[in-house]
């Protein structure tokens, strides 16, 4: 009797508390590396992509979250104009999927961005203004209800899901290297206290995406801000987020959304707090969202972004990982995490959050030191001018972060951040093996 072929796609378990792969639990340690497609579009830069994937696999990382979009006049734009796609860049994304699949890695692919880097929603709004002959605006909030924006975006969804990989011959909708589609990176609708604009877009877009691709999981891609559907938990938000148009529980209740995500940036969100308070907040942020997923949402949770400044990074990662493992062992609704971020040793640390699995090259190290000095100078000038910290954050967000980091090495008996990641990856793999042996947790 021939054994059935193994299930290659990640699914949600029958009890809705975790991911499964071929009937066994799929707990994972993951990472973010947003630039893979744009670097892969340049043959001379593809080694940077291979280095990231090789380092991830060697460390036991199973999932990589990355961008599958790049719009407008951005460098190596995938969609330089509405409905027009650069085959060279699409081939770069083909390369990323093929190489990830060859290494047994799974990808979470974000499909657009609330923020301006890589075009995203702001670029769609500009295209709509051009089409309608009206004055251009940078208000990404207009994206959700704009018919022209949605026509262009849904055409993109049709194009990417039906794309056939030029390296493997496999359509994207049938490619098991993709774990999930993320509707957007950190979607919100600032100024909409009702939350209806974002919610209607989530419901419509997730349903449309599922009609195009029934093989892959779909998530929203939000940070987890709590809204009016959980009024008792509003104090757990990092600040007053009611004007962001987000509601964690409501946003993930759509039947076309398979799992929930949160992001975790206590050093950005709690600007005047000390590190002890920030760590306390981080623990509470994870716990309250696990509780919502367990008791109300009944869908798995993924911590899709978390990072920390250089000082204390290893200890902070260790605390977050231990908390996730404790929830997983208890059978709670969490499946894994993706730290922010990793890059090849030849790629500068533009955002101050990069974890290098191998030391950066001397040239990159020198550039990182210069970036750190520039960020420190900018911070001092901002304080001297009396401008708000939020304004500084917006300036630095253009570089996706705050300060440059240097590669971490073990100090005394303490683990480096790389060793912490490797340890967590092994623990998660052990949980998978235990579940595979008994088929239950």
Image (cartoon, rainbow, N blue to C red):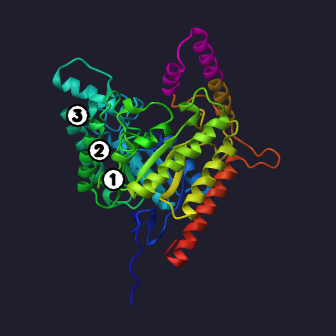
Left or right for 170, reference 382: left
Alpha-carbon distance for marks 3 and 2? 11 Å
Classify 10 Å Cα crowding around label 1: few (below 14), some (14-19), many (20 and above). Answer: many
Asked if the residue under mark 2 is in contact with the one under mark 1, i.e. CB atoms within 8 Å, the reply is: yes
Residue designated by label 2: 202
Q: Residue 345, how many percent across, how many down?
A: 62, 41
* Circle nearer the N terminus (3, 1): 3
Name the outermost residue toward the bottom: 1
Alpha-carbon distance for marks 1 and 2? 9 Å
Q: What stretch is highlighted in magenta?
A: 373-398
Q: Residue 64, how many percent across, how many down?
A: 49, 51
Kindly tell me whether residue 32 is visible in this rendering.
no
Left or right for 418, reference 344: right
Which of the two residues, 178 or 282, is positioned nearer the viewer here?
282
- Residue drawn at (77%, 48%) of the image: 414
Q: What element carries label 3?
A: loop
Kindly tell me whether residue 299 is visible in this rendering.
yes
Left or right for 356, reference 178: right
* Circle nearer the N terminus (3, 2): 3
Alpha-carbon distance for marks 3 and 1? 20 Å
Q: Is residue 254 above or below residue 88?
A: below
Residue designated by label 3: 145
Main SS of the magenta part reads helix
* Circle nearer the N terminus (1, 2): 2
Residue designated by label 1: 257
């Amino acid at each position: 009797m021939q054994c059935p072929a193994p299930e290659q796609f990640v699914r949600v378990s029958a009890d809705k508390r975790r991911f499964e792969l071929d009937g066994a639990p799929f707990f994972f340690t993951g990472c973010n590396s947003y630039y893979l497609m744009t670097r892969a579009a340049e043959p001379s830069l593809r080694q940077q992509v291979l280095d990231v994937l090789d380092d991830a696999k060697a460390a036991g990382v199973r999932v990589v979250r990355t961008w599958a979009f790049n719009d407008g006049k951005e460098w190596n734009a995938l969609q330089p104009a509405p409905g027009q796609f650069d085959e060279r860049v699409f081939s770069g994304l083909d390369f990323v999927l093929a190489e990830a699949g060859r290494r047994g890695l799974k990808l979470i692919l974000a499909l657009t961005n609330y923020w301006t880097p890589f075009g995203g929603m702001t670029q769609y709004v500009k295209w709509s203004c051009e089409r309608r002959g009206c004055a251009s605006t940078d208000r990404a909030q207009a994206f959700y209800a704009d018919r022209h924006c949605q026509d262009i975006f849904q055409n993109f969804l049709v194009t990417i899901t039906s794309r056939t990989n030029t390296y493997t011959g496999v359509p994207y909708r049938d490619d098991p290297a993709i774990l999930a589609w993320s509707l957007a990176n950190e979607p919100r609708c600032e100024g909409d206290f009702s939350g209806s604009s974002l919610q209607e877009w989530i419901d419509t877009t997730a349903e449309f995406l599922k009609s195009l691709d029934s093989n892959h999981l779909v998530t929203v891609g939000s940070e987890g801000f709590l809204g009016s559907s959980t009024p008792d938990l509003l104090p757990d938000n990092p600040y007053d987020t009611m004007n962001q148009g987000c509601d964690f529980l409501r946003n993930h209740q759509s039947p076309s959304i398979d799992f929930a995500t949160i992001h975790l940036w206590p050093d950005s969100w709690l600007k005047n707090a000390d590190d002890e308070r920030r760590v306390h907040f981080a623990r509470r942020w994870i716990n309250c969202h696990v509780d919502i997923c367990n008791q109300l949402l009944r869908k798995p949770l993924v911590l899709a972004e978390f990072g920390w400044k250089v000082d204390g990074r290893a200890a902070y990662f260790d605390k977050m990982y231990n908390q996730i493992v404790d929830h997983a062992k208890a059978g709670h609704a969490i499946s894994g995490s993706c730290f922010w971020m990793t890059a090849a040793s030849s790629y500068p640390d533009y955002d101050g959050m990069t974890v290098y699995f191998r030391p950066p090259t001397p040239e990159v190290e020198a550039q990182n030191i210069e970036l750190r000095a520039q960020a420190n100078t900018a911070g001092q000038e901002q304080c001297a001018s009396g401008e708000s910290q939020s304004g500084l954050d917006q300036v630095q967000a253009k570089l996706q972060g705050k300060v440059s980091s240097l590669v971490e090495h073990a100090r005394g008996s303490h683990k480096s951040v790389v060793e912490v990641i490797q340890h967590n990856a092994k623990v998660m793999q052990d949980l998978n093996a235990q579940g595979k042996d008994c088929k239950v947790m």
